[in-house]
Image (cartoon, rainbow, N blue to C red):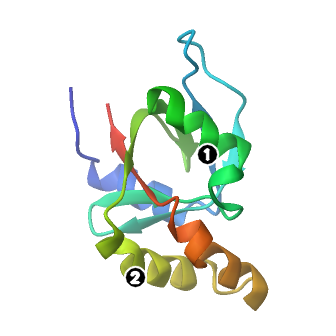
Amino acid sequence: MTTTWANDELDSVQHAEELQIASLKSSGTLGSWRTIWGVRVDDDIYVRSVNGPTSDWYRGTRARQEGRIRAGGVDKDVTFVDADEEINGRVDAAYRAKYGHYAAYIIKAITSPEASSTTMQLVPR
């Protein structure tokens, strides 16, 4: 089992505009696919819920903390690991750099304290 991303996977996810994510339900089946934004910080991929912890897809990650992502040709099973608060500033900067061409209110929402509270590292499994 690998717990690190290959460089080409990191590049592909970083260059993909959107990421699709599905949580593994308690039954062991994948839930509905949701389209979200994801960013690369160093050799890791991070996601967060723009709508904070009440978002359906985010709440789905809480059950088994496992799921699957698809982005830029990468299709991978992942574990959702709650990120340390110390990384949030770097994740904010990555969101601003990657998605800064969107309206300022959208960037403000994805870098808000509420969204930051949902920051998760995606660990390949």
In the displayed orientation, state which residue is furthest to the bottom: 104
Q: N-terminal of the two: label 2 or label 1? A: 1
Q: Residues within 10 Å of mark 1 (few under 14, many from 20)?
A: many
Kindly state the secondary structure of the residue where label 2 is placed: helix
| Left or right of 19 on screen, residue 93 | left
How far across and how far down the image is residue 48, in percent? 55, 60
| Left or right of 4 on screen, residue 123 | right
Q: Quadrant of the C terminus?
A: top left
Where residue 28 is drawn, which disc sits there? Answer: none
Q: Check disc 1 and give the amino acid type.
A: Tyr
- Residue 68 visible at all: no
How far across and how far down the image is residue 1, in percent? 21, 26
Residue at 46 percent of width and 84 percent of height: 93
Q: Which residue is mark 2?
A: 89
Residue at 28 percent of width and 55 percent of height: 7
| Left or right of 38 on screen, residue 105 | right
Where residue 58 is drawn, which disc sits there? Answer: 1
Which one is in front, 53 or 92? 53
Kindly state the secondary structure of the residue where label 1 is placed: helix
